[in-house]
Amino acid sequence: MDQVFRFEPKDRYNAFITTRNDVPFGEGSLSGIPLAVKDNISTAGIPTTCGSAILEGYIPPYDAHVISCILREGCALVGKTNMDEFGMGTTTENSAFGPTLNPADISRVPGGSSGGSAAAVAAGMVPIALGTDTGGSIRCPSAFCGIVGMKPTYGRVSRYGLVAYANSLELIGPMARSVQDVSLLLKVISAYDPRDATMTDRPYLHTPAAKVAGCRIGVPEEFFGSGVDPKVASVVWDAIERLEGMGAEIVTCRMPSMAYALAAYYVICMSEASSNLARFDGVRYGPPADTRKTWHESYSDRRGTGFGAEVRRRIMLGTFALSSGYYGKYYAKAQAARQMVRDDFQRLFSEVDLLAGPTMPTVAFRLGEKTDPLSMYLSDILTVPANLAGIPAISIPCGEVEGMPVGLQIMGPRFHDENVIDAAFAYELEGRS
Amino acid sequence: MTVIIGLEIHCQLNTRSKMFCGCAAGYQDSEPNTHVCPVCLGLPGSLPGINRTAVMYALKVAKALDCEVPPESEFSRKNYFYPDLPKGFQITQYDKPLAVRGSLLIDGEDGEKAVRITRVHMEEDPGRLVHMGGGDRPRYTLVDYNRSGIPLIEIVTEPDLRSPKEARKFLNKLRATLEYLGVFDSDREGSIRVDANISMEGHARVEIKNISSYKGVEKALTFEVTRQKNAIRRGVKIERETRHFVEARGVTTSSRSKEEENDYRYFPEPDLPPLRVSGWVEDIELPELPDARRQRFIDQYACSPEHARTLTGGIRLAGFYEEVAPVDPPLAATWVADVLLGELSYRDMGIDSVPVHVFRELLEILRAGTITDKNGVDVLRTLLDQVRERQECESPAACIVRLDLGKKAGGEIDRIINTVVRSNPGAVSDVKAGKKGAVHFLVGQVMKETRGRADPAELNRLLLEEIDRLEG
Amino acid sequence: MVTEKDVISVASLADITLTREEEALFAHQFTTILRYFDVLDTVSGVEYDNTGEVNILREDDVQESLPRELVLSNVPSSEDGYFKAPRVM
């Protein structure tokens, strides 16, 4: 690395937690391209906070697998982006470093939890960024900010170095202003990594081809259920009809497990989170433990003050869901419901090639609008099914409602990321022409 | 009152690397925190990768213990918060263990018996804590994560043991089996830790946690048997509780910690897919195990059953015996089992510290009869002391010459006997009068003159002959 | 209905210190959230199927550990190479 990229952003949206000014870069398919990374992906020598006070000052001694991948391809890693603490949120308001603003309307949230990455891309500060998606955290802010974001098939990108929130659901994925850039970045980060035992050695080597004619696209009625803003629904239906105009066959269908998906998702992610977030004890990293107190005093107090309210809520609910006497009612049932979602997708993908619908039920909320946790959770209803089933899903801009971007979500069967990309690419080209 | 004992044994497997990462597992003599990486330090973002050899070793144990191995097992997280657990949970196996329903034969109090094995599962060792500031209230804790992530197997028995001694026998047999399998190094400090459940039939069960030596298990259980029996005799109710063994004092104490009430919130480890081992066990070829070797020692070396049991009790001991046995199998068995082991134990030394060629030479000398048994023991002691002090020793022949411990030639002995008989007329007349003690006195005098280099039994005979000759 | 007492007991199990206000607020919020989760009660006759997942094992090869300066780089003070933690007794 002998070349240097000068990065001097005017970060009016609070998209970044850490920025670098003179950024070295090398040769490769991403040579010299400024790239922003969500702050829950470990970067050697660069602070990695996960948007939390509990990790303040932590500098990882190692790179996440995806970081090694992008650096090997010569990108300029210009900074770490803001996020809901540990990925827990749909607005990027739950950050110890203050909320990120939506570049399309600074009175609104950018969506979450990868809100910093989405805003940085949408504002043109960087052309591409890495986000992470546990229950929609790439697709939601992509939709709200009007960019393209993709959650690849679970197992297609290594999670090594991604600070875990809900291991069985989450993945790192690309965010950009075009489907082609999303595809390029996915190609770079999908290199096989045996350190992630849930990874499959099926790298994405695809070059997008606009291909949607003859494709059967299913539209589950439940994707346009009661919580979906009719204006958003209308914009998305227009987009689906445009796909039909391009030669796709549109098939309406049913997905009954949608009734359970959100509850299953939250029980599982909270349960896993309650265990994942137990390690921040201040012994090995993070603000140091107070050795004047006893171990338990120090630990409880640190968790009381170091974690924000939403993180504590989820840790406590997850702890409860796994506790003796409740495991069967919550965790075990949630896993069964997760299976129903998978079964539904499997059935649907035996009939259609892809599924389509809105990414989010509404456009971006106003800052401070969502105060009740459950109503916030409910806005994830359309994104969580893909995480429960581990299938690929992309959000692409498909229009506006009252000046705010709307996202079209396209999903495919596991390891058919290529087909999802091709359909999105076809839509994107059509939209431009 | 029937004593009911069940054991949970944690053993470190002697793999090269740790259970879930590539850090070297041989940490014993290392500086703290030098065998650690993002995985075993629990750094955010790190992921576990299962060590294939650890799984193979655990399966070997399962097969040797005659367990059923289900086609699929699962790793789970055991959640509790303690500074030795860098992730805030331990990766272990919970409701889908690697192996279930096995057994191990031991020589019980009433003959051979099969102790049922409930399960064998794999897990990771936590780090090591050092409590600083001493006394009842340490000021703070130091943490070394070198041990964090060392592969462990936990072996759980059914409550089939009926006495502390049986528990000890079970552990000895288990240790020998693990050693024979080549999966375990019993010399490693902390390589085995035992939790014991003990109750008097019809009374509440007490768990004794974290006993870290073989002798400790028998001691702790013996203490607990006495304590519980006394309590019952006095009509005091036995509380269901967890107790700790205080090795230094040989007692168990009630632990006030709420550990037993802990809700560990187990759930499947989402970072590790289920472990599928169908067909693996069938492909494992077990080496000769202690029972087979014991029988072979009886057949091949004509060892007594008792000697065979002792000599096969550890793989290195058995190997040592087989190296020295060719000199003279019965003589070797006696000298290894009845003499050498005691001398080693007295010196707190292991069989590994005895040079095989030295011991062979000593056996050859003993077989040639050019040294008495008594002086043979003295030579052995001298050589072992040398080894202990400077890790090497002179040859037995050199030792015998240096200390002049060889058997005296016949002529010299005769001269000494002659002198002794002449200079002790009183004792000689006592012998003639039939006083047995006087013979012993005369033997002692000769032994003193020869500095032990004569055979006492033979001396007895020679002395009586000499006295007879005087009469005639 | 989740009471403040329930919240306190879960907070203790989770080892998280809460303020009095949070205890009340969380009790209210948990009630709503858990009521929503009750939909899972109607799930039956389905079992989680993991047959698609395969194990990936690591060979028993020793890899270099982190240099100790890096191991201890995130703590302000260590003692003789040890990490320092509060007393556990």
Image (cartoon, coloured by chain):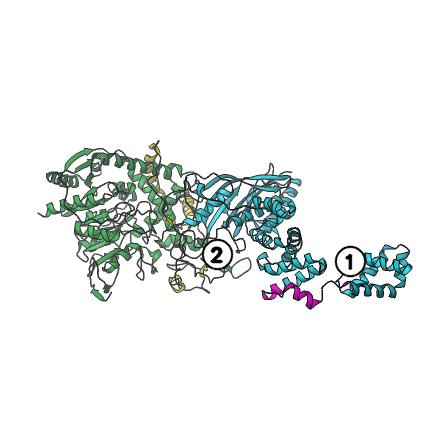
Chain colours: A green, B cyan, C yellow
- Mark 1 or mark 2: name the one nearer the start of the chain: 2
Outermost residue, bottom direction? B402
Query: What amino acid is found at the position of numbered circle 2 in the picture?
Result: Arg
Which label number is shown at residue A371? Answer: none
x, y percent for residue B58: 46, 46
The reply to whether label 1 and label 2 mark residues of one chain is yes
**Contact? badges 1 and 2 (CB < 8 Å):** no
Subunit bearing disc 1: B
Disc 1/disc 2 C-alpha distance (Å):
57 Å
Q: Position of residue B301 (x, y in %)?
A: 62, 48
Q: Could you tell me residue A431's position as x and y percent?
A: 11, 46
Is residue A322 shown above or below B131? Answer: above
Where, by quadrant of the figure, is residue A31 drawn? bottom left
Residue A352: in magenta span: no
Mark 1 is on which residue type? Pro
**Image: magenta residue range:** B384-409
* Residue topped by disc 1: B456
Which residue corresponds to mark 2? B128
How dense is the environment of label 2, judged by Cα within 10 Å: few (below 14), some, or many (20 and up)?
some
Q: Secondary structure at mark 1?
A: helix
Residue at image point 89% right, 58% down: B430
Indicate left or right for A161 with B60 as reference: left
**Which residue corresponds to the image point at 59% horizontal and 66% vertical from the top-left?**
B390
Quadrant, the N terminus of chain B: top right
**x%, y% of residue B277?**
41, 42
Q: Does the stretch in magenta take in B403? A: yes
The subunit carrying tag 2 is B
- Please identify the residue farthest to the left as the structure is shown: A433
Q: Residue furthest top?
A: C45
In the image, A184: left or right of B14? left
